[in-house]
């Protein structure tokens, strides 16, 4: 049996942070960052049977057509994603009463619908990006074992050398999206590229307020980076951890993002709700 400090549950038997019971989630899950976006996207669902929240984790489960879907918020950052993916996995693959893994593992479909910042002039505000590969500047995957098979080490090594990556920062890691999920969106108008998952919004994404960054030219370098004909499309803050943990745990993961700001042109899309709703409706129809 797991130690109580390893697999933590609440008095009602729900998983600790998400405050969910195993039957509360569907096999197809949409992940958003903002808890308020759960309420917004839940208007696309019918027959809602679950509405729960705890801290930044808000959950709604209902139906889109004949497909049951859970929408859940992660909050911001890969540290929150570490909680989210591990606890979602525990809900379907661990007996919460005994702490024992179940004999037949369940594979979840996890699609992040997020906002992001375009890193190239040809990734304009209002466009949709599909993250074929997420490169994590966060280091989360290095806290786990057995990930080497999952990573594109050539891409991350080439990028680190190109950026003259300092030893004081976690080494970048590159993880590909689930090919089966990415293929479902093949006919849609998405910009496909490499997504950078940063461990912060300001310095880690090259923003300067009162503090200088370690490399004032990093965004320009990222915009010009090319590897085997592939380029970097955008910044966000979660996909590397979603792809990495999902791959290790046997789940399918994909991120699609709405670009609400462009770091090259300085454009920003203030009213992005209609575009976000259109993106969510598209995802729900396809999955």
Image (cartoon, rainbow, N blue to C red):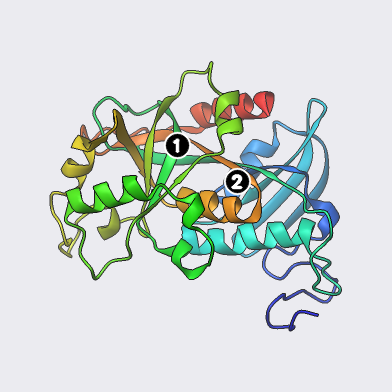
Q: Is residue 142 above or below residue 286?
A: below
Q: Is residue 41 above or below residue 102?
A: above
Q: Nearer the viewer, mark 2 or mark 1?
A: 1
Rendered image: mark on residue 95: none
Residue lying furthest top: 187
* Residue indicated by mark 1: 131
Q: Which residue is mark 2?
A: 31
Quadrant for residue 26, please give it: top right
Q: Is residue 179 visible?
A: yes
Q: CA distance from mark 2 to mark 1?
A: 14 Å
- Position of 209 relative to 111 (above/below): below
- Quadrant in which the C terminus is drawn: top right
Find residue 64 and report its image quarter: top right
Q: Nearer the viewer, residue 264 or 248?
A: 248
Callouts 2 and 1 close, C-beta under 8 Å? no
Q: Residue at 50% of width from left, 52% of height from top?
A: 149
């Amino acid at each position: 049996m797991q130690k109580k400090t390893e697999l933590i549950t609440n008095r009602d038997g729900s998983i600790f942070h998400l405050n969910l019971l195993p039957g509360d989630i569907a096999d197809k899950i949409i992940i958003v960052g903002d808890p308020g976006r759960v309420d917004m996207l839940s208007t696309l669902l019918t027959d809602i049977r679950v509405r729960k929240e705890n801290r930044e984790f808000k959950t709604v489960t209902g139906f889109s057509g004949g497909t049951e879907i859970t929408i859940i918020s992660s909050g911001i950052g890969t540290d929150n994603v570490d909680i989210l993916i591990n606890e979602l996995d525990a809900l379907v693959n661990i007996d919460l009463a005994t702490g024992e893994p179940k004999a037949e593992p369940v594979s979840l479909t996890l699609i992040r619908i997020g906002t992001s910042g375009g890193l190239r002039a040809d990734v304009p505000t209002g466009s949709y990006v599909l993250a074929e590969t997420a490169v994590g500047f966060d280091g989360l995957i290095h806290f786990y074992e057995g990930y080497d098979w999952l990573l594109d080490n050539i891409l991350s090594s080439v990028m680190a050398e190109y950026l003259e990556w300092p030893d004081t920062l976690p080494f970048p890691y590159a993880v590909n999206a689930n090919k089966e999920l990415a293929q479902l969106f093949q006919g849609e108008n998405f910009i496909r590229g490499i997504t950078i998952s940063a461990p912060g919004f300001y310095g880690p994404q090259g923003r300067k307020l009162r503090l200088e960054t370690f490399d004032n030219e990093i965004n320009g370098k990222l915009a010009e980076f090319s590897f085997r004909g592939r380029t970097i499309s955008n910044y966000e803050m979660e996909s590397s951890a979603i792809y990495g943990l999902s791959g290790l745990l046997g789940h399918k993961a994909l991120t699609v993002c709405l670009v609400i700001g462009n770091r090259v042109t300085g454009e920003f899309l203030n009213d992005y709700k209609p575009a976000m709703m259109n993106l969510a409706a598209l995802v729900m129809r396809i999955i």
